[in-house]
Image (spheres, rainbow, N blue to C red):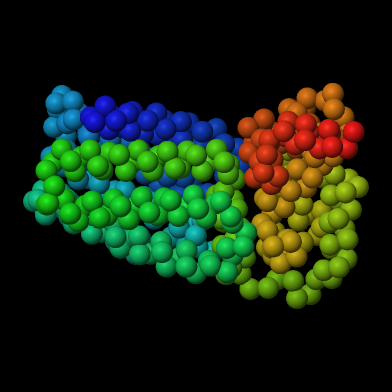
């Protein structure tokens, strides 16, 4: 049984390294530097906790009963809060009151271990309630998310399980607690990795949904029909979506709109965010090319419609169509022959 827990810890450490490196290499990121730093600290903190668990389970060293373990434990929830706040709240401004989030962390330095450990999970429950409230406020945007909601729900369930484990800690022996906590952290890393592979632009999609949920209308003085006609021409005639560097600001400039106006227009008229709208245009064109030119490679088609990598093309195609590009070509090429 111990081997299973060691595998969960090993996967966590490997996934943490990949997430940090992948985030650094990502060219399009909707987060500010402060939120990005919080994300790095969150992943590094979880990896640090797993490393201390590993040392204890292998009887190499006892870092679980150290001040470092408590500091890492108390730092997880605030790091998650600052990482996700920009994604889940329309307008974010940093204030001096944000420093209060460090108070539980400071208390971990003075509280006795037997009190500090369960108190850390009590603090985490407060942040989980905040997350539940924010997500509930976005319920009107749920039509934009399908499997994404299931993935986020899985992470929420894992977080609840961690809190339950923390509250029943006095009823467990230490090895069972450490093993259970290690497994839940490993499951969280697995869920995050799988979600990012399946929905590589989920952060941008969530951010756009939040903006749409809370923003007031910015289209009162805009001729929507004229703008929609121009947008249609840019997509169908000019094929602007084939630009790998296409973003909200560039398209808004072409339409002589502000970014907020364009975001609201796409949200209200197409019931989806900008990122998903562009992916839809690219996938629609890719479907045509797959059938029109059977000899063209799938990768070449994906790159020609604006995707920067094969993995992004395959993930988007599966999301929009429900099957791989090659499978789609084989199925519909044979039926039309």
User: In this rendering, would 192 be left or right of 47?
Assistant: right
The quarter holding residue 210 reads bottom right
Determine the image quadrant of residue 103. Answer: bottom left
Residue 298 locus on image (x, y percent): 75, 28
Picture layout, residue 54 above or below residue 90:
above
Name the residue located 40 percent from the left edge and 47 percent from the top edge.
38
Q: Is residue 70 visible?
A: yes
- Compared across the picture, whether 283 is left or right of 120 comes to right
Residue drawn at x 23%, y 51% is: 165
Q: Position of residue 152 (x, y in %)?
A: 47, 52
- Residue 162 x %, y %: 29, 50
**Measuring 45% from the left and 58% from the top, which residue is drawn there?**
85
Could you tell me which quadrant the C terminus lies in?
A: top right
Q: Nearer the viewer, residue 173 or 119?
A: 173
Q: Between residue 18 and residue 287, name the one nearer to us.
A: 287
> Can the viewer see residue 99 in this picture?
no
Residue located at (45% from left, 55% from top)? 153
């Amino acid at each position: 049984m111990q081997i299973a827990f060691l595998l969960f810890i090993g996967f966590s450490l490997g996934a943490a390294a990949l997430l940090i490196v992948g985030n650094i290499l990502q060219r399009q990121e909707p987060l500010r530097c402060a939120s990005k730093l919080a994300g790095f600290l969150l992943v590094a903190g979880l990896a640090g906790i797993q490393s201390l668990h590993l040392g204890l389970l292998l009887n190499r060293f006892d870092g679980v009963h150290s001040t470092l373990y408590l500091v890492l434990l108390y730092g997880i929830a605030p790091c998650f809060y600052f990482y996700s706040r920009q994604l889940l709240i329309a307008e974010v401004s940093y204030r001096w009151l944000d420093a209060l989030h460090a108070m539980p962390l400071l208390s971990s330095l003075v509280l006795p271990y037997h009190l500090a450990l369960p108190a850390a999970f009590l603090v985490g429950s407060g942040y989980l309630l905040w997350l539940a409230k924010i997500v509930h406020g976005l319920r009107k945007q749920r039509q934009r998310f399908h499997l994404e909601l299931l993935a986020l729900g899985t992470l929420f369930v894992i977080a609840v399980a961690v809190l339950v484990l923390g509250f029943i800690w006095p009823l467990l022996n230490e090895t069972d607690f450490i093993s259970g906590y290690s497994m839940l952290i490993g499951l969280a890393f697995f869920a995050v990795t799988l979600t990012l592979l399946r929905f590589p632009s989920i952060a941008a999609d969530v951010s756009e949904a939040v903006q749409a949920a809370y923003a007031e209308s910015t289209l009162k003085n805009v001729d929507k029909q004229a703008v929609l006609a121009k947008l249609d021409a840019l997509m169908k005639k000019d094929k602007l979506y084939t630009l790998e560097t296409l973003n909200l600001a560039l398209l808004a400039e072409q339409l002589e709109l502000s970014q907020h106006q364009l975001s609201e227009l796409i949200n209200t008229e197409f019931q989806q965010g900008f990122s998903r709208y562009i992916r839809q245009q690219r996938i629609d064109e890719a479907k045509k090319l797959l059938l029109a030119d059977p000899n063209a490679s799938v990768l070449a088609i994906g790159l020609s419609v604006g995707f920067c990598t094969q993995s992004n093309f395959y993930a988007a195609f599966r999301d929009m169509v429900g099957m791989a590009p090659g499978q789609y070509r084989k199925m519909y090429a044979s039926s039309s022959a």
